[in-house]
Image (spheres, rainbow, N blue to C red):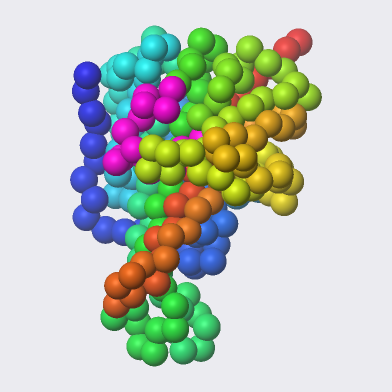
Amino acid sequence: MKNKWLPITLALAGILSAATAQAHGVWVAQRAGEWALVLGENGVDDAYKPEAVKKVIALSADGTESTIKIRPQERNVILEPAASAKAIAASFEDGYWSQDANGKWLPGPKTAVAGAKHGGFYQMYTQTILAPGYQPTSTTLSAADFPLQIIPLSDPLALKKGKSLRVQVLFQGKPLPGVPVATDYTGDTKVRTGKTDKQGQVAFNIRNAGLNVIKVSHTVKRIDRTDADEDGYAATLAFTFPHED
């Protein structure tokens, strides 16, 4: 199995405020006929520094890793998975953001922002399904590399718009109860399910006949708040139904 890493030398800076960073997500989608890692919200994509992408892996039907080529561009990252790949998983580091005395969010830890009132360290993850037949388990992705995950409990591409999909939300490898899931992140980001149950599971009706991006967020308060008050995590599950004539 091969891990494909991109070295991190800089956190994303000068593009997003922390408030919008928490509102954003990442997923993989077709752009100009190529697979690209997308940073966005409600159908709007943003440019980002390729160095913010920490890890990208392609996955076969049984969850084993397959080959993938990563092509950093000036404003994003293009991905070339093997033809046999059924899914792509990626992690994205937005880094430290802090709110100054005037309420403005700036890149950097609290120690680097004068009069900082609040700060956080923010990371995003995606599991994007490319083709039918992919059925991951709770151990398909490493909890160390992908601490927050949305796991489909059946193959979404075997379903259609309007059908029910049940997912499980995991944090650090364990079910995460009591969190709502946004079910239409490229359309109406306010559409959410009820909260996940004790097993971290929730069911909802698939909203779109094309691209579907499902998102969940989770925040953990830090004990040592010198650099940041919290660690913020966001994860998506994405898939696109093929066009029907």
- Look at the image and say whether residue 81 sits in the magenta stretch: no
Tell me if I can see residue 214 in this picture: no
**Residue 239 horizontal/vertical position (percent):** 57, 26
Up the image or down, 180 lies above or below 203; here it is below
Image label count: 0
| Residue drawn 32% across the image and 16% down it | 64
Classify the position of the N terminus by image quarter.
top left
Residue 237's place in the image compared with 121, above or below, is above
**Picture quadrant of residue 167:** top right
Could you tell whether 7 is left or right of 157 in the image? left
Image quadrant containing the C terminus: top right
* Magenta region: 137-150
Q: Is residue 100 above or below residue 198?
A: below
182 with respect to 128 (left or right): right
| Residue 110 percent location from the top left of the image | 34, 78
Residue drawn at the location 30% of the way across and 72% of the way down: 224
Q: Position of residue 118 (x, y in %)?
A: 44, 78
Instruction: Identify the residue at the far right of this view.
Output: 162
Considering every residue shown, the one lying at the far front of the view is 198
**Is residue 148 inside the magenta stretch?**
yes
**Between 201 and 129, the one nearer to me in the picture:** 201
**Residue for point 50% across, 20% down:** 130
Q: Residue at x 38, y 37 (%)?
A: 173
Magenta-colored segment: predominant secondary structure: loop
Q: Is residue 43 above or below residue 16?
A: above
Pick whichever, 64 or 7, lies toward us: 64
